[in-house]
Image (cartoon, rainbow, N blue to C red):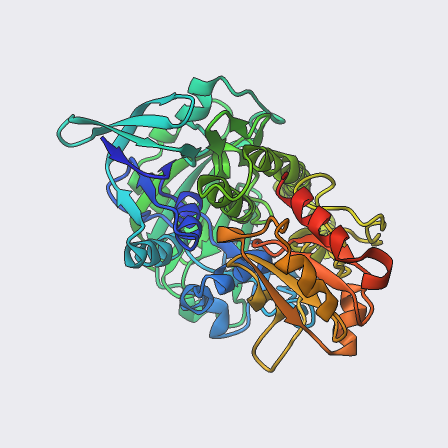
Amino acid sequence: MSEYDVIIVGGGPCGLLTSLLLERYGVSSLVIERHPDISIHPKAMGIMRRTGEIYRQLGLYERMRAADLTTREPHELTIWAKGLSGEILGRVPHIEDAGNVTPCVRFHCPQPHTEAVIARAINESQLGTILHYKDVIATSETEDGVTATYQDRNTGEETTVSGKFLIAADGAGSRIRQRLGIQVEGPGDMGHFINTYFRANYGPRMEERRALLYNALGEDFMEFFVSVNGQDLWLMHHFLEDGESAGEYTESRITQMIKHASGMPEVPVEVISILPWVMSPKLALQWRHGRHFLVGDSAARLSPSGGMGMNTGLQGAHNLAWKLAAVVKGDAPDALLDTYQAERLGVAAAISQSSNENFMEIYAIVECALRGDWDRAKEKITHSRRAGSVLGLDLGRTYEHGAFAPDGTDAATNDDPLNDYTPSARPGGRAPHFWLTEDQSTLDLFGNGFALLTGPDGAGWQAALDSAEWPLKGVLGTTMHSLTEPEFLKLYGIAADGAVLVRPDGYVAARFQSIQDNGADWLVAAAKESVGA
């Protein structure tokens, strides 16, 4: 029986990223995917800044952005119009304005490209193995590991493999989650859709109306278009009426719908693939079941309104991977793994609520259009809650409980939590970005283990790192960096002899305003608290 450290069921973006993150700590993994290859249908496309920071940490940021159409010319976020090419009802700008708080931007990357880039990096690593066209038909758990039995979808041959832990990244309908009996909750079905990937050379007609998303409305239709490459590759989401089924929509019928809604019936349309889907946000109530963990849509399926679904899953994988690696390598106790759910479930719930509110806003505008109340539709578009930077939602997520030592300070409050973000090195939050050189950020110091950032008079903290009691060793090994800039000290909220301990995922584990107030022994205690030692 083949043995791996971690078995990952599901080879979408979240499963693949988990494998790659584990590799950097020397942890082997097997990814088992039921489809014959990576996705061909560009489902998830929006990449948020925080996800970009993860890619930057892995050296993949520029590779991912190679597929970003916004690098070539400016785009709006959303254009509302009477048909794809008709009268514009309103525009929602693609607001960036984040250069002072992150080295990364939001961008547009088709899911097949995302998967291809990560899969290539896994294949280069040699610690991760990807198997396609295999169905996992059973998993079991022992005192010291797990087994998974998969079936080759070509031959029917069954194979059993073993590992220390298993990650279920097998989507919103996760069979593993169902077998484990884990319950989910959510608002129920919010709509059934057909997502059509097609080719049509609309680019030349869109020069003055370039956007990532187009909500095309008419009194007899509503269609949601997504630009894949800005020229001839597109998605169209069609809402199914009550009683309709996806099977009623032939390729010919969908082609005519696209031509009608585009307002460009003379342009040839080639349907590439059709994918039915259900908007049914759900949160699993348990993200860990013994040695099984839920990641991605199996843990939290979000409404696509706002583009946070895949991003939330990828960031969850980032949270879990270093903890799994530490436990697999014997550098941290099993209890550390419980902090995955403690930290991420609440974040996913908050983001899900925001995504649902986005959808209800969109639906209200559509209702106005369908009854011909165009003035009211325009007014609602003007006041769109999405017309902002969404920095608060993107970078401002903090944990209330988990693998960190609170320092007694209060979280920042913002008038607009969706768009406003106040950088802070408060434990439980993302460590702030600060430019160290023209092209190096403090964020570039994180990822391989823990990082201890001190002020220019912080040499005294070295005693904690040299202590026999220091718990952050092995894959969690700690690197100390002395930073002298006054702006850094102010941003991180420490004195010249203060220190901030940052986890491998870039979240703050502990902060000490001054060694005079706390002492190196406090740092040892905080480090132990951060891994449950």
x%, y% of residue 78?
A: 59, 58
Asked whether the viewer can see residue 427, the reply is: yes
Q: Residue at x 40, y 35 (%)?
A: 276
x%, y% of residue 175?
A: 40, 24
The furthest residue to the front? 468
Q: Nearer the viewer, residue 116 or 216?
A: 116
Q: Nearer the viewer, residue 175 or 81?
A: 175
Figure quadrant of the C terminus: top right
The furthest residue to the bottom? 438
Asked whether the viewer can see residue 369, the reply is: no
x%, y% of residue 29?
A: 35, 43
Task: Count every numbered label the image shows and give the total.
Answer: 0
For this view, does 374 lie left or right of residue 118?
right
Q: Residue at x 53, y 41 (%)?
A: 220
Figure quadrant of the N terminus: top left
For this view, does 288 lie left or right of residue 493?
left
Q: Nearer the viewer, residue 501 or 468?
A: 468
Res 121 quadrant in image: bottom left
For this view, does 387 lie left or right of residue 231?
right
x%, y% of residue 442?
A: 63, 69
Q: Is residue 337 above or below residue 80?
A: above
